[in-house]
């Protein structure tokens, strides 16, 4: 995906998603350090359309709970003997739907501990 595709996703989905979640404009937007994210056109759009952003340094420890969810999904998918793209698609969809709400809740609830670990480590690596 390139920067213009990412910008298009933000333009078409960020406000609507926040509204659907009942957040309105009361949320802090956070993105990882993927090269397309800090592109000037993206940063400029966010400046005018997203009041609250969490800006982090590139070497900051990984606090992206979605990455941990992707790892969970990957481990679940690897338990299957995949032999075709169609089977992979089916297994991905099934395993995604099988992710328990407790799993996502646990990841979100772990954020205070993760942040405390980062502060204690003064920004260096943590067990997370």
Image (cartoon, rainbow, N blue to C red):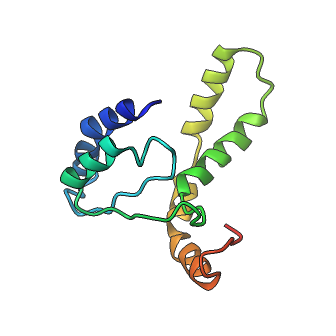
What's the residue at 67%, 16% (across, down)?
85
Q: Give left or right: position of 47 versus 88.
A: left
Q: Quadrant of residue 106?
A: bottom right
Picture coordinates of residue 102, whole percent (x, y) = 55, 58
- From the viewer's perspective, is residue 6 above or below residue 109? above
Question: Residue 42, percent across and down?
Answer: 32, 44
Q: Is residue 7 above or below residue 54?
A: above
Would you say 39 lies left or right of 58 here?
A: left
Residue 54 lies, in percent from the top left, at 38, 64
Q: Is residue 102 left or right of residue 128?
A: left
Q: Going 34% across and 57% down the picture, which residue do you hit?
A: 29
Residue 103 image offset from top left, x and y in percent: 58, 56
Q: Residue furthest front?
A: 40
Would you identify the image quadrant in which residue 12 lies? Answer: top left
> Which is nearer the eye, 36 or 54?
36
Residue at point 68%, 72% (across, down): 126
Residue name at image x 32 percent, y 49 percent:
43
Q: Quadrant of the C terminus?
A: bottom right
7 up-or-down from 120: above or below = above
Total number of numbered discs in the rendering: 0
């Amino acid at each position: 995906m390139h920067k213009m595709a990412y910008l298009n996703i933000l333009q078409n989905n960020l406000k609507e998603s926040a509204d659907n979640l009942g957040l309105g404009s009361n949320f802090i937007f956070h993105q990882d350090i993927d090269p397309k994210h800090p592109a000037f056109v993206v940063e400029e759009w966010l400046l005018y359309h997203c009041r609250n952003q969490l800006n982090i340094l590139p070497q900051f420890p990984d606090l992206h709970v979605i990455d941990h969810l992707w790892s969970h999904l990957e481990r679940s998918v690897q338990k299957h003997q995949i032999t075709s793209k169609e089977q992979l698609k089916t297994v991905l969809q099934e395993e995604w739907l099988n992710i328990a709400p407790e799993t996502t809740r646990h990841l979100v609830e772990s954020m205070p501990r993760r942040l405390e670990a980062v502060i204690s480590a003064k920004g260096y690596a943590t067990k997370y």
